[in-house]
Every structure is written in C-alpha cells, then in structure tokens.
Amino acid sequence: MSKLRILLVLLMIVVLLALSSFWSRSSNIDNLAYVVGMGIDVGENNNLLVSFQISLPNSISGESGGQSDSSIVNSIECTSIEAGLNLLNSYVSKQVNLSHCKVIVFSEKLAASKGLSPYLFTLIDDVQIRPDCNIIISRCDSAYFLENSKPVLEKLSSKYYEITPSSSDYTGYTQNLTLNQFFYTLNTCIANPIAILGGVNTPSSQETPNSNHIGQDGSYKANETPIDSEPHIENIGLAVFKEDILVGELSGFETVCHLIISNELNTCTISIPSPFVTGESIDLRVTQKQKTKSEVNLINGTPYISCKIALEARIISMTGNDEFINTENIHRIEEYANSYMKYEILQYLGKTAREFGTDIDKFGKKLVASFLYKKDLDEFNWDYNYKNSFFNAEVNTTVVSGNLLMEN
C-alpha cells in the first residue's frame, strides 16, 4: 500500500507539472497581445477595414506616458471581423487577445449605410469580448479615432477608455453605453438603441461659439468644441438608431434632456437666461430631485406623452449684484428655469419623434398596459406610430443659492 501511495503521489506531481508547463506556455502574459480598442469601418470593394489598438508591453508596467508609446494601431482590409483577427494573428508575433477590449468604435459611414447587426452578433458571441465594453459611433474614420486617443492623464490606454465615459456622471453631455445595452435594446420592439457619439477635435472641425446664445456650450457635438489643444478624441452627444441603422445625433444638452427623461442624470451644469439682466445668464448645477414620471395614453389612436419632472438646482455663478439673491428673486429664477427646461425638453422630444422617428426613452414600455393582447400591440406598430406622438412636460425646479445669500 505504501508503494502504491508513493506511485500515486509521483503521478500527481507529474500531471501537475505538465499542466503548469502547459498553462505557462499558453497563457503567459508575454505570449499575448492585448487589444484595448477595436475600430470597424467601410473598406474598399465593399469590404471591412478593421483596426486593432494593441497595448504595448511597456505600457502594462505603467512606464509609458502617452499614446505614441503605450499602444499601436494596426488596420486590416478584410471580409469579416474574425477574418481580420485571423490575419492579425498571422502578422504579429503574439496571440491576439480581446479580453481587455474597452471600446468598439464604428464609423458613422458604416453605421448609417450598412447597419451594425451583422457585427454585433459576431461580437456578442465572442467569449473574449466583455459585454460591458463601450460602443462609440465616430464622426471620423474609426482608425483615425483610435490613433488620436491620447491618455495624457493616464498611463494605460485601457484605463483611459474605462474612465472617459464616466464624464457623463458630472457633465451629462454623454452616457455610459455598453455592448450588452445596445444589443438588448436592438432586440426589443418598444425602444431603439443609442450609442456614445465620438470624434477627433481639430481646429478645422471646431464650431465658432456664439457669445450671444445662452446655452451655447451645450449645443456642441463630438469634435466641435472650441478647445485649444492638439487633435484629441472627445465624446459629446449620442448617436441615435432606428433598429440598427444610424439616423441622427444629439448634442450635449439634448443628451442632458434624454438623461432627465430616462432618469439617468447624475448632475450637470446648465445656463439659463437671467430674469434680471437682458442678455446675461445664470449657471445652475442641476440634479434630479425626484424620478421623472412619464405617462403614455392613446387619444383617438394617437400617442399623448406627458412627463412630470422635478429638478434641484444650485446657483454656481451669475452676473449682477448679490442683492438679486433673496426669496422673491429665487422664485423668479425657478420660474425661468422651469420655462427654459420645458422648452428644451419639448424640443428634444419633438426631434426624436418628428426628425428621427425613434423612441430612445422607452416610452413604449408604458404603452404595453394599453393593450390586452401582444398581437394588438404588434399591430399598433409603436416603432412607426411614435412619430405621431404629442408631448407635454411639467417641470418643477427648486433653486438653492450656492452662497446661501437668501434673505429670510
């Protein structure tokens, strides 16, 4: 028995050493090339141009400081994503791994002409692709977008991509949208998907600010902001889809309206016209005081959508004298804020219905209760009838002075 035990122990040691050797050879980080970003664009001859942003080994240890030495971008003309990946594996000296891919960038051209369904089914079925990676629609070529992602304040490109969408928490100018969210919404009949709108900001793409227009800062989309810097990617606004086809874009402030309606707003800054000085503005830091309550009713077969919105705003800057900050004038600011936000939200809702014909705020879910049977809902065809909707918004804003200068 003792000899048998010794033989079993020796056999186990041999097996463990063999498995350990196999694991080290196949899964060692030195043998893998990690993709942190993928770009998909229209190539020549109706093919695809797939770009892979690969993190360099020295960036993993945190030694690099910028895009030029933290990653490289390889672009491949191919017939499919899998074919491109296979070609890349035959080119680089390491096995390409997608488990750390943080962003998938589609160009506007591809999203508007071909749609995303063929590529999304491939990506969602790949066990290496994480469902929480972000979907970005680029207003420029996807390869150019990846090449200009410069993690100035981060040493790792993967960390940079992971943190950037979180700006939606304090600006409201974009939304942290992922592959699984897009795929889920795409496969429902009562809503349409959206994605992050991205671009590369260059002097030639920037919009000239209109100093006389209140709220101008929120009217920009990706690559339009007048920022004095080298070409750099920025994510502002949303890309709007009808099924899997890109049909329009939302600006930064239109995205704020969407976040308020869909109860996704954390905090943002808005500028409203001053009720005291013509041509001047007041900046408010806005959060949702309560969740927005939306109702959808059918009146003579036409959708009537009403939204009750409760906001809390803190004054963070204003022109004029501090004597304006008393109880009576706070109420005037609240009235102006209510009027301004109601107008902007109704403009936003009208745009999604009349111009895009897409329900991205999931009003269709509210409509389900109006039909006894699913076939009746299907026959009503919400995806088509949303464009005929009428809207009403009730906005109630509570304003607090940032400096607590209110008089009793």
Image (cartoon, grey):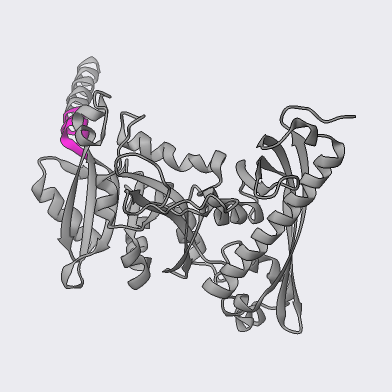
Q: Position of residue 324 (x, y in %)?
A: 79, 36
Task: Characterize the magenta stretch by its predominant secondary structure.
Answer: helix
At x 15% / y 33%, what residue is drawn?
A: 25
Q: Is residue 362 visible?
A: no
**Which of the 4 image quadrants contains residue 67?**
top left
Q: Position of residue 94 (x, y in %)?
A: 14, 40
State the residue at coordinates (30%, 44%): 231
389 w.r.t. 123: above or below: below
118 relative to 180 in the view: left or right: left
Range of residues picked out in magenta: 18-33
Q: Is residue 242 above or below residue 4?
A: below
Relative placement, left or right, of 127 versus 316 is left
Left or right of 158? Residue 85 is left
Please report the residue visible at 56 percent of the width from the left and 46 percent of the height from the top: 172
Where residue 45 appears, as percent x and y from the top left, is 16, 72
In the rendered image, which quarter contains the N terminus?
top left
> Does residue 406 appear in this view?
yes
Give the vertical position of 263 relative to 2 (above or below): below
Front residue of 388 and 192? 388
Residue drawn at 27 percent across, 44 percent down: 148
**Residue 76: in magenta span:** no
**Which residue occupies the extreme top position in the image?**
2
